[in-house]
Amino acid sequence: MAAAAARASRRRRAAHAGVAVLVLLFAACGTSRSAAGPDAPTTTTPPPASGGEGRDPLRQPFASDSIWNTPVGSAAVYVPAGLQPLPGGRRTGRVPQIDDEPIILTPEAPETPILFSDAAFEGDRCGGDPRTVLRTAPIPAGYVLPSDNNNQSAAILGADRRTVINVQPLARCAPGGPATSLVYFPDTDLYGPGVDGSHGGSGLSSLGGSIRLGELRPGQQGPSHALKVNVYARGELTRCADSADCSRWPARKADRYGPEEYGTEGNQNPAMRLGALLTLPPSVDLDGIGLTTEPGRQLAWTLQNYGAYVVDDAFGPQFALNAEVGPAGSMREQFRSDWGYDFEVGSDVTDNPWAEDVKRIRALLHVVDNNGPDSVGGGGTPRQPLLPPLGEPPPRTVVQPPLEAQPSAPTLVR
């Protein structure tokens, strides 16, 4: 695609409040919906996993010292993120937005072919190529995920109850039919570190860090794990020279257009790169910042104790939290049912107190600048106890096809 056409295409996606990601094409994320058919589970939380008597890996996946499960530490070095209540100082934008992540944890479901679709993020994903099966994965026969132009960064648990299959963008347009995707990323281990996955901008997980069904509910304290956010890259990430310069650990890469577009509209904070760990420093008194909603207080608690990783470009003046959608249900629908107002809020909405809380929180966020492989969360004494270990894992038997075998293999630069 020529540069001018690519820029025009990205402007069209921005009009849909998209979240851009790199696979080989770049996506946008606005809203998405899924439909659970008669064969889909009706529970709002995943069923228990087999393979041990410890922590349930379906509800709290990955190792205790995974980046998603490690709290911020006492040695963390904090640098102001420089975020404003609305991204880039704009007067419009969705704060918060939601990046729906299809999380399909039904290993007993029928093995379903995932066909290659080059529709990617602008065409009809329903028309997959029956001659090119990227791979198969267990998907309930009644589960439907309509075609749209959103990220749909998916995590699907394999039949061995251990292998996580990572594809993007997922679609499943008819009950019992095949699914489609542009690309699959390396498989990950439900019992392992869980760093990588199908977020095309950063290469990070779509399962780890997701706000899961059963979280942000009345009477809770807040999710006990790190979260994931998408920010407005033009206005809130720093200028950079190449993919490695545009990202920081644990991100594996950055959007191909990063050197051209990141940081062109404002924030020149060198700490703000894809993969940054955002948090509220301990100096912030959560009771004194004017929060008026229970989910706002829960979000603030999680951000102060665990933080949130920047995993994608919101591709517009949006601030997206990544959350579960799938056969078990929709986080956005659960939130609406629990609290009586929408999770995703446009700037023209002035009567949503949750949105006002998120704006207050944004302006106080800092980057843990010494977050790294040897000092996850900044190191030192963690602010919260580590999760208990997982039980004995089942044998891993799902075989991933070679990445180069797919028509549009992902490129991981780290």
Image (tube, rainbow, N blue to C red):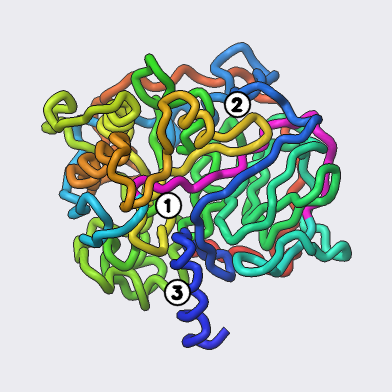
User: Which residue was labeled with disc 1?
Assistant: 311
Return the x and y of residue 350 as percentages of the image width and height.
Answer: 28, 44
- Distance between the Cα atoms at labels 3 and 1? 21 Å
Q: Are marks 1 and 2 in contact (CB under 8 Å)?
A: no
| Magenta region, residue range | 95-114
User: Which residue was labeled with disc 3?
Assistant: 11
Q: Secondary structure at mark 3?
A: helix
- Distance between the Cα atoms at labels 1 and 2? 22 Å
Q: Which mark is residue 274?
A: none
First in residue order: circle 3 vs circle 1: 3
The residue positioned 60% from the left and 63% from the top of the image is 410
First in residue order: circle 2 vs circle 3: 3
Above or below, 298 relative to 186: above
Indicate the quadrant where residue 284 lies.
Answer: top left
Q: Secondary structure at mark 1?
A: strand
Indicate the quadrant where residue 245 lies.
Answer: bottom left
User: Which residue was labeled with disc 2?
Assistant: 58
Q: Secondary structure at mark 2?
A: loop
The residue positioned 52% from the left and 76% from the top of the image is 9
Which tag is nearer the camera, tag 2 or tag 3? 3
- Tag 3: amino acid: Arg
Q: Residue furthest top?
A: 53
First in residue order: circle 1 vs circle 2: 2
